[in-house]
Image (cartoon, helix red, strand yellow):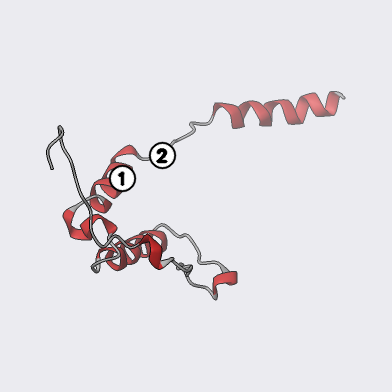
Amino acid sequence: MKLFIKICLPIASIIFCLKVSGQDIQYTRMIIERLASQEFAGRSIADSGIFKAASFIENQFRSNGVLPLAQLDNNYKQCFPVSSSLSITAADIKLDGKE
C-alpha cells in the first residue's frame, strides 16, 4: 500500500494537473460556416454541393490525421441508398399565410 501511495499518487496528481484542452472553437466555427456556405449549396443532392461537401470533409479528416476505416476499403466515404420518394418535385410555401 505504501508503494502505491509513493508511486501512483504523485503520478495521478501530475496527470490531473495537466492542462486539458478542449475543442478549438475557431476551427469548429470555420467548419460550420464553410459547410453552411453557398459554396456547398446547402449540401444539396440536386447539384454538386453534396459532393463538394464530402470532399471538403474528407480533406479535413485527412489533414487532422483521421484514418479511413478498413471496413470501408480504407475510404472515408460510406455509400447508402436514398429512396427516390425523398425527392421533392414541387413545393408550396406559405409565409405569414401568403403563398
Task: Report whether 13 appears left or right of 96.
Answer: right
Q: Nearer the viewer, residue 55 or 99?
A: 99
Q: Residues within 10 Å of mark 2 (few under 14, many from 20)?
A: few
Q: Position of residue 86 (x, y in %)?
A: 38, 60
Task: Report whether 27 appears left or right of 71.
Answer: left
Q: Position of residue 81 (x, y in %)?
A: 47, 69
- Residue drawn at 25 percent across, 64 percent down: 49
> Type of residue at label 2?
Gln
Residue at which label 1 appears: 27
Q: Quadrant of residue 87?
A: bottom left
Element type at marker 2?
loop
Q: Nearer the viewer, residue 97 or 87?
A: 97
Q: Are marks 2 and 1 in contact (CB under 8 Å)?
A: yes
Task: Report whether 39 appears left or right of 83.
Answer: left
Q: Position of residue 47 (x, y in %)?
A: 23, 68
Q: Is residue 91 above or below residue 23?
A: below
- Residue drawn at 84 percent across, 28 percent down: 3
Residue at which label 2 appears: 23
Element type at marker 1?
helix
Q: Is residue 58 above or below residue 42?
A: below
Q: Quadrant of residue 24?
A: top left
